[in-house]
Amino acid sequence: MNITVIFFLGLIIALVGVIPPGLLNMTAAKISLKEGYGRGIVFSIGVCVIVFLQTYIASMFARYLNNHRDVVEILQRVAFVIFVLITIYFLLIAKSEPKPDIEPHTKSKHSRFFQGMFLSAINVFPIPYQAYMTITVASFGWMSFEKISVIAYVTGATMGTFVMLYMYIFFFHRIKSKKFTSQKNMNYLIGTITGIIAGVTLINILMEL
């Protein structure tokens, strides 16, 4: 498939993964609010350096799994059950709990860059998420595991992460409103996203029967 399409697939998938307010995007927003947009962007660049590496590792893992279809079929079924349970939890069970306020402390631009790298490195969620999504995209025939396709996808995912962090940085005042960031609405948002992923997983499983 055209590498431009693969690039935008990676970008969109990464955007979806970073939409819910979390440690990385909220820290980027707070840094920009307290120290200026420039340092928020430096922090985001540090995050994206690690995201590039994580997504590449995930793609290599996905390529290995793609050559062992029996393992992929088992993982797809396990992933479907997990996403359904997560969806049920966030839509029906999760209660509102106050989130701790994370205050940035370091001031140096270099510190912000390395802080972004560090926080991104301890956030390992992108690896299983991207591995699963890469396998799913490949199973639909939308990308292959050739080097150029993988690089296009990884670059798109990195850019998608940066775009979402950028949006948090520049629209933080709007995002900060109680209506948008209440824990109840956050639970609905996360539950909806995982529900969509569960639906895609189910379609993929049924197509392979």
Image: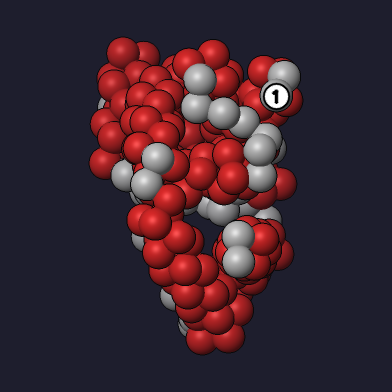
Question: Where is 177 relative to 122, above or below?
Answer: below
Residue 31, position in %: x, y? 46, 32
28 lies left or right of 11: left
- Which residue position is annotated with label 1? 1
- For mark 1, does the 10 Å Cα neighbourhood hold few (<14), some (14 to 19), or many (20 or more) residues? few
| Viewer-closest of 110 and 154 | 154
- Hey, which quadrant is residue 42 in on the image? top left
Residue 184, position in %: x, y? 60, 74
Secondary structure under badge 1? loop
Residue 4 visible in the shown view: yes
Residue drawn at x 60%, y 60% is 208
Residue 23, position in %: x, y? 41, 47
| Viewer-closest of 152 and 189 | 152
Question: Where is 139 relative to 165, above or below?
Answer: below
Residue 119, position in %: x, y? 31, 37
| Viewer-closest of 87 and 181 | 87
Residue drawn at x 29%, y 35% is 121
Residue drawn at x 42%, y 68% is 78
